[in-house]
Amino acid sequence: MKLLIIGFHKYDDNMYPHLRCFIDQTSTKTDLTYFNFRERGYFTQSMMSQKSRVRAWALAIRALAHSAIDTFTLWRKYQNYDTIIAIDHYAYAIASRVFKEKRVIFWSYDIISADSVIYRHPFVRAFMQSCSAALMRNERVIIQDEDRLNLLKESLHINDHELDVIYMPVCLEPIAITERTLSSQKRPRLIQSGGIGAYRCSDQLLAHYQNNSASYRLYFHGFIFKEIKEQLLKCDAPPMVSSRTVSPKHIYQLSDYCDIGFVCYQDEENMNFFLTARASGQLVEFLRVGIPVIVMGKTNMPKFVEEQGVGIGIKDMSEMNHAIQAITQNYQQYSQNCFQCFNIKFDIEKYVPRILGWL
């Protein structure tokens, strides 16, 4: 099988770890090529945020130029591939036109749901309609779970159409860690990773730490946004901070240094972000090294982590100390639940053979 995957990241150490892991696992069993389609289709959101109309049009022209060049490259170089997977709406809409005689598979990461900011933009509406027509014809989808499938179908107005679906949450390969011990009962290490910004409540977490640094040690790892950098300069109790790029194969070593993970999603209150329980790369990184999590934000993740016994959901920072204490008092059970949850639900080695058979 000649498999072409069309995504929106370069294949490097900044690539989304779940995608890179899937490519690495699958390339040992197929003749696989990864193509970096440089535009994801979200440039419309950047356009809408620009005060300058000239700047907005410049962004659009550059994005469309990239799209045109990449589309031509796909048409010219990759017609001999028999299986094509396109990630998310924009790449799928274009790939379905380029490979008209082939069955293009839609791999859904993020959904442009009807309650999102860009849903009614004319450009977005056009390629969403193209996606809908292509999916009605091709009928094949890879997506994280049934709730997200229903949201995707609703957003594309194909609720009554049956699709050939395989469910694969955001998942990673297992590592050789099967148990862990708490570094300190009095001051456990708490880590937030990924985007460190107000949109992930990092500002609230840092403010909480100023009055509670005797209860836990805070560690930030990831891209530090400007507002957090400014806040760090003024704080009396600075956390440990790292923003260096780490290979996807070694990210787990950062989490392994800590005891508890903190995850918060509340940058946009729409259904795509609400349904993050099986779509969060941060959560999976913590689970595979046995790190219990504290989750905040208006999503379905707090319910999920409590049902699985892998962490605690909190409504706001006033509940943080209680959550830390509850986890440390029963740390081994929480940690073992994390390993078990990862092995059952998020181990990519359970999904790749199933997907290859399906393809």
Image (spheres, rainbow, N blue to C red):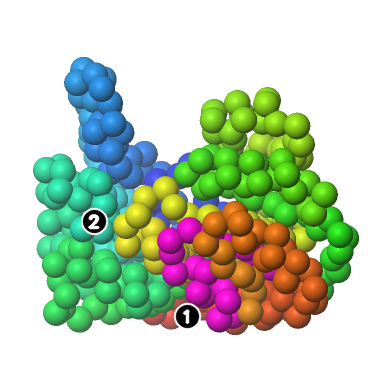
Quarter of the C terminus within the rendering: bottom left
Residue 81 image point, x, y percent? 33, 59
Which residue range is magenta in the image? 288-308
**Residue at 78% over, 77% down:** 330
Q: Nearer the viewer, mark 2 or mark 1?
A: 2
Q: Which mark is residue 115?
A: 2
Amino acid type at circle 1 is Arg
Amino acid type at circle 2 is Asp
Quarter of the N terminus within the rendering: bottom left
**Residue at 52% over, 51% down:** 16
**Residue 332 location, quadrant:** bottom right
First in residue order: circle 2 vs circle 1:
2
**Residue at 24% over, 78% down:** 163
31, above or below 69, in the image? below
Residue 147 image point, x, y percent? 34, 75
From the viewer's side, name the closer residue of 184 and 251. 184
Going by the image, does 280 lie left or right of 309?
A: left
**Residue at 73% over, 54% down:** 190
Q: Does 346 lie within the magenta span?
A: no
Q: State the separation of the CA atoms marked 2 and 1.
A: 33 Å
The residue that mark 1 highlights is: 354
Residue 349 image point, x, y percent? 59, 74
Going by the image, does 317 lie left or right of 72?
A: right
Residue 231 appears in view: yes
SS type, badge 2: loop
Residue 67 appears in view: no
SS type, badge 1: helix
